[in-house]
Image (cartoon, coloured by chain):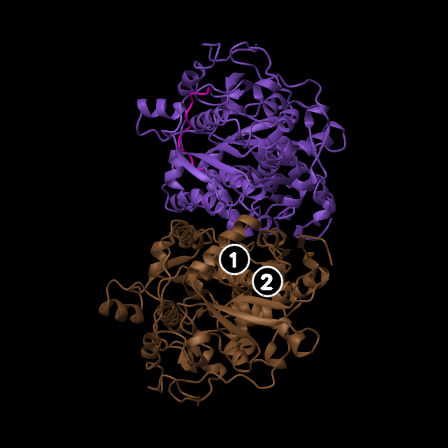
Chain colours: A purple, B brown
Amino acid sequence: MNEATRVLLDESCIPRNWYNIVADLPLPPPPPLHPGTLRPVGPDDLAPLFPMELIAQETGADRFVPIPAGVRDVYRLWRPTPLVRARRLERALGTPARIYYKYEGGSPSGSHKSNTAVPQAYYNAREGVRRLTTETGAGQWGSALAFACAQYGLECEVWMVRASYDQKPHRASLMRVYGATVHASPSQMTGAGRRILAEDPGSPGSLGIAISEAVEVAGAAPDTRYALGSVLNHVLLHQTVIGEEALEQLAAFGETPDVIVGCTGGGSNFAGLTFPFLREKLAGRIDPVIRAVEPEACPSLTRGAYAYDFGDTAGLTPLLKMHTLGHDFVPDPIHAGGLRYHGMSPLLSHLYELGMFEAVAKRQSECFEAAVRFARAEGILPAPEPAHALAETVAEALRCKESGEPKVLLTALCGHGHFDLNAYDRHLSGLLEDFALPRERIDAALTGLPGAADPSGPSGP
Amino acid sequence: MNEATRVLLDESCIPRNWYNIVADLPLPPPPPLHPGTLRPVGPDDLAPLFPMELIAQETGADRFVPIPAGVRDVYRLWRPTPLVRARRLERALGTPARIYYKYEGGSPSGSHKSNTAVPQAYYNAREGVRRLTTETGAGQWGSALAFACAQYGLECEVWMVRASYDQKPHRASLMRVYGATVHASPSQMTGAGRRILAEDPGSPGSLGIAISEAVEVAGAAPDTRYALGSVLNHVLLHQTVIGEEALEQLAAFGETPDVIVGCTGGGSNFAGLTFPFLREKLAGRIDPVIRAVEPEACPSLTRGAYAYDFGDTAGLTPLLKMHTLGHDFVPDPIHAGGLRYHGMSPLLSHLYELGMFEAVAKRQSECFEAAVRFARAEGILPAPEPAHALAETVAEALRCKESGEPKVLLTALCGHGHFDLNAYDRHLSGLLEDFALPRERIDAALTGLPGAADPSGPSGP
């Protein structure tokens, strides 16, 4: 076992391929459906929104997808990211467990989102697109895409959920520093926005609404495409650089993981870390427990239905088979904005149904407690999203303390919390709310699922 | 020449010694004086404020000071820091110059300040101190010390300049996450604070006032010591890890620097980068131009007197021979809070008098313009302080473009600007003020120098 604290890799070790787990599955994931015909969507359906290369990646089955030199060249600004042994946290907990975290917060925009923002901007620019639209909740994705667009000379237009826009003005400022235009959503600029505002002029917005706005604008302009920061297969694909590097770094530490923990919102961070390890597990080379952590306020995996549903609120996207709380579900205002999404990546949902990983849900106060513990020991201030993964990592390490097992724990620290100090203030002052989510609220939301009034959800097309 | 973008070093390459430039000077720097006796202060004068080991370092003349294992162990959380070739900025500028930046913003508290906070907390803890007090302006130093105290189980109490406390509440939040107590300064807790508030109940505070408060509290409690984030010899000493690593990394790039640029407030970041290069220059192995950049609103090197003056406003510190605008001088509210100090490190001032480096002053609008240019090209959002160094680096690169000279430029990017987005907002909206500083205001401030009504200042003891 290596005595290092951090294993850094030279930039020559940036992965040369993204890993597509679809190639290794016993069963392919159910396809997205056209909401009108209920037939699988084809490339032509997606062409108004995405460049051809990303559509090919979305539906491709090749095990490895080469990372273009023009993408690796931008990755070099911050990749490979460090894998760190949390020795001080281990000591503070008095655990025999060995805790490792892969830190993505050193990227230009401060989270793992840059890993997919860069290739998305790259492929769009190469296919002659002039402008990208997107939505953002907490703002990590919007800043990542703004940065990526600046790299390839694209315009970037972001619809930011009104509640976050007001609470975290600095996230919008960062996007503007990178040259992007930012609108609070719902806005008067789109039909979807105007409809919501007509009903509720004070609407705080939601990710689903912001997606509707960005999709509407991209669909209407020939030189404009749309970019999504999570959920879709090509996004998860791009994030696998995290896990590929972590595999190599954990081996450099001389370790084999026993438990791998990540947080899930749309699922891209969790997939990015775990897919390469799942490949090794499917091949019988390692056998870690793999565990997703979601907020109790938005428990799509642990309490949602597995059903076809829209990715957005207005119903503009294809139908996706996924774990969902219903596209009308508006989660309580927890501080982990990146985890406030009614659905879950269809690919991850499929893997969950196949039993390839487990899931737990956490209250936000437990997450902030773990985050403060982590910051005091390790120095880095975690974003509220990975604080969920840290809470479970700490809980696992304390179980190891009881049992005496020196397990090897690996987690993804997918971003820093420099824009989340309001939330830390509330936690330290004892003002943080934990939201109870009654079963009836979920049941009510699930009755809104397309094609099913049954709370268990439609069973497929 | 290496084709890499970043040169990372393994943690085994963390320097084993700090470098004390005093050992290599043709003339020793003038000593600090006791304000009552005007005799050089001795260890006993400093003992109420600092632990013995730091006092020894403050006055020591050994060329190299070993870095204790207990300090290197914490350094491993973020050191060595990367040296990055700013290829994208070079391309954006169209310059033949090759631009390198040493990035310290990846430290736990987001700036180079952690490099000295950690050893200061370490030595205090080892000598049985229970609590450290300090002042902070923009908040980088306060967060660094709060983090360092958490590492060694010390209490940390911070007086934060009222103007910054109100403008940047999140910096105080970060200190609290690390477990520190934070007061707005001037406060009612000290005689110095009460005197200021009696005269001006709405005082926005200043670094000089906050220092007075922290020094007063430390001096009165036997288990409490004071920690300073810049100016003093031992602080500059600790920062030399920056330059030692950069020397090795620039060699790995296969480069020799032609111009080295850093920003100066109290001087520790500039000294940290340049002292090891100055050692090599004194030895005749390299011959770079070395240039300090200060704000036009606080031009201690370019327009101050070289004179004995107090380090704080209330006159509690020893007299320091330094470039100063007078301890009563209150700089205009530029956003680079870390550069708003009336004086300059006595050691750096001495080197400046010896002609070992040159200095220029910049308006803040030019600095923010360079910072935005940098962020769009390189991704990292610079703090307003290193934005000063970037402005001069960009100017130098554009001169190279005109002359066609492929010079090698090296600069210190000493911190990120995640807590400075208000300032970026103002810049992007065209609301940023550039402050003119009339000669008369400096003259008036200099008449307040101890022992001299003459604006050129006292000539020494």
Residue under pointer 1? B415
In percent of width and height, residue A74 lies at 63, 44
Residue type pointed to by label 2: Glu
Residue type pointed to by label 1: Gly
Read off the magenta span.
A326-335
Q: Residue at x 53, y 60 (%)?
A: B390
Which chain does the residue under circle 1 lie in? B
Of mark 1 and mark 2, the one earlier in the sequence is 2
Q: Which disc, if any, is residue B259?
A: none
Residue under pointer 2? B402
In percent of width and height, residue B405 lies at 65, 64
Determine if residue B112 is in view.
no
Determine if residue B203 is in view.
yes
Secondary structure under the numbered disc 1 in the rendered image: loop
In the image, residue A202 above or below residue A456? below
Residue placed most toward the observer, B457 or B55: B457
| Residue A292 in magenta stretch | no
Quarter of the image for residue B242 reads bottom right
Q: What secondary structure do most residues of the magenta stretch adopt?
A: loop
